[in-house]
Image (cartoon, grey):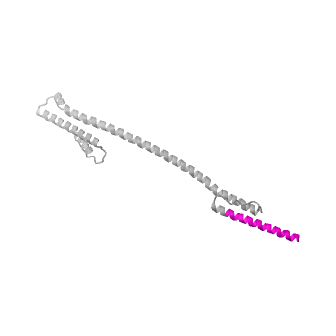
Amino acid sequence: TYNKLSDQLQSMRNDRTGVWSAADLANIKAWSESLRAYGEGFEQVIEDVNRGLLTNTLSANAAIQDGKNAFRVMLDGTAAASAQKLVAAQQAEQTILVSSTRLNQILVGLLVLSLVLILLVMNIVPRAIIRPIQTLSKAAEDMSKGELEKSVPTELSIRDFDSLAQTLERLRISQKTLMARYSRKAETKSAA
């Protein structure tokens, strides 16, 4: 277990991923020193027991007390650092959640706005095209029935329709003039 902990702390000190801050690395170094002190204290107790200097568990336990205290420093430090990292991760998660929620709200708002605009365009554009066509169709129908007194509206809001309306208006005036001439000729012939 000691070797595994030592290897893990050494790997953290190497910090190849850049995850640890300078303060974290300082703590990791202190924990490594605490673990080293624990290991050295434990080895000293084993050596003293083997030499016969420590003959009972109470004296062995008292001799390793400094090492146990150093090990406790490492355990407490790693627990506190883990708790701090957890809080920082939770805060980052909350920030991301708030940001993504806000982004989703904006996207939904843009979607609704887009749909409203699409519906408006789908409603307005056909009307803008159909209304002038219907007006011109009605004027052409009236002219075909001989109703030449009604003028053709020449401003329909779309340039090409305006041009067509002006042409129909000229045609109506020409037909009206032609009909007036025929009427005068017919009156002149019937009077003579």
Q: Where is residue 139 in the image (x, y as percent from the top left)?
A: 72, 60
Q: Is residue 58 left or right of residue 127?
A: left
Residue 14 is covered by the magenta coloring: no
Residue 188 within the segment the image draws in magenta:
yes
Magenta part, dominant SS: helix
> Which of the image's four quarters has the C terminus?
bottom right
The answer to whether residue 1 is seen in the rendering is no
Q: In this view, does 127 lie to the left or right of 23?
A: right
Residue 32: percent from left, percent from top: 23, 40
User: In the image shown, does 152 or 108 lie closer to the viewer?
Assistant: 152
Q: Residue drawn 41% across and 40% down?
A: 94
Work out whether residue 37 can be spotted.
yes
In x, y percent, where is residue 39? 19, 37
How many discs appear?
A: 0
**Residue that appears at 85% across and 68% down:** 187
Which quadrant holds the N terminus?
A: top left
Foreground pick, 44 / 84: 84
Q: Quadrant of residue 64?
A: top left
Above or below — where is 181 with respect to 37?
below
Q: Which residue lies furthest to the right in this view?
A: 192
Q: Nearer the viewer, residue 100 or 59?
A: 100
Would residue 33 be found to the left or right of residue 108 on screen? left
Numbered range of the magenta stretch = 164-192
Residue at horizontal 48 percent and vertical 45 percent from the top: 104
Q: In this view, does 81 lie to the left or right of 47?
A: right
Residue 15 is situated, as x and y percent measured from the top left of the image, at: 27, 46
Give me the residue at 33% from left, 38% from top. Answer: 84
> Dividing the picture into quarters, in which one does residue 3 lie?
top left
